[in-house]
Image: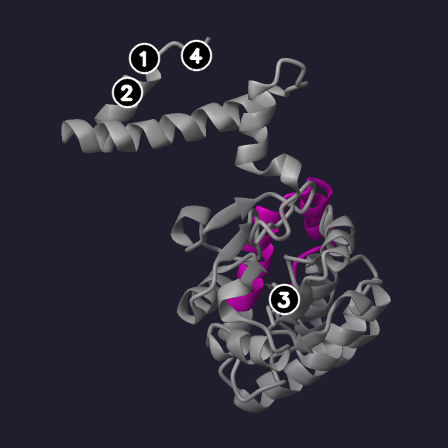
Amino acid sequence: MNKKFTILFDLDGTLVDTAPDLMRAHNHVMKRFGYPTKSTEEIRNLVGQGAGAMLGRSIWGQAKKEFGKIEDEKIKKEMVTEFVDFYGKNIVNESKLIKGVKDFLVWAKKKEILMAVCTNKQEHLSIDLLKKIGIYDFFEYVAGHNTFDYCKPDPRHLTSVIEILDGDIKKSLMIGDSETDANAAKEAGIPIILLEDGYTEKNINEIYHNHLIKDFVGVKVYPSKIYLPKKNQLAWKIAEIASDKAKLSKDSIEMVINRIIDNASVAIASLNRKPVIASREMALKHPRN
């Protein structure tokens, strides 16, 4: 029996833009305990610009640094408790789905792809957020920070969920927005799709990833030809090009031509014992019409 394809998602910054509500909770706690806060206007201006990267590298990053400076463990524990309590009561005031998420989840569900959430947010907060924002029912499992005795970047956070779903690690991938997600996926041996402008202080080129997306608009994942419509398969597109009556888009033509050129480059390199790059230049010189 063939096992189904599995997609694991991070939550904050991947499925949901939670920064405004997280920062509101952060400010509430910092103010109550007498520490500096960020103004609501600062947060609102950044959110209004849609600057996820600025949120990640400026406000959110600074918040973590400020919290990290607190050395009194008793006070820090009280602050965490206060944060969880306040955030839990105000979890979807301004949070919203990342663009295209709902459509992607609907598409994946129709394809019978297994989906689960692997987040470092506490499990009960994660489930509450997913329910209140309206996407909880798309997922077979939600694994939070406290679900297991380990969490990301420990790869077991991902592999354990795949095992629970009776999935296949070779038919799984992770979608996340930070080095925490990327490192967990890399160690687990599964591909990672990285969202731009994530909740991280690192630049994209500093984070391991197999694919990069801006959001979920138009995203489709085809793990194998089982899920790939015939009209999107290379052989079918070649057949279309060979047909006099075929209606072809520019993208379809370019995809086929580039694939043929790549194949020709390898063949030329083999025959002439030349590097593939040099051989590709030779293939490109061949007329396209």
Local secondary structure at mark 1:
loop
Neighbours of disc 4 within 10 Å: few (<14), some (14-19), many (20+):
few
Residue at the spot of label 3:
4
Local secondary structure at mark 3:
loop
Residue at the spot of label 2:
281
Q: Nearer the viewer, mark 2 or mark 4?
A: 4
Which numbered tag is attached to residue 288? 4
Residue at the spot of label 1:
285
Task: Kindly indicate whether the residue at mark 1 contacts the one at mark 2 (C-beta within 8 angstroms).
Answer: yes
Q: Is residue 30 magenta?
A: no
**Of marks 2 and 4, which one's residue comes earlier in the chain?**
2
Q: Is residue 113 visible?
A: yes
Which numbered tag is attached to residue 16? none
Horizontal side of 185 relative to 282 (left or right) equals right
Alpha carbon separation for disc pair 3 and 1: 43 Å
Q: Amino acid at mark 2?
A: Glu
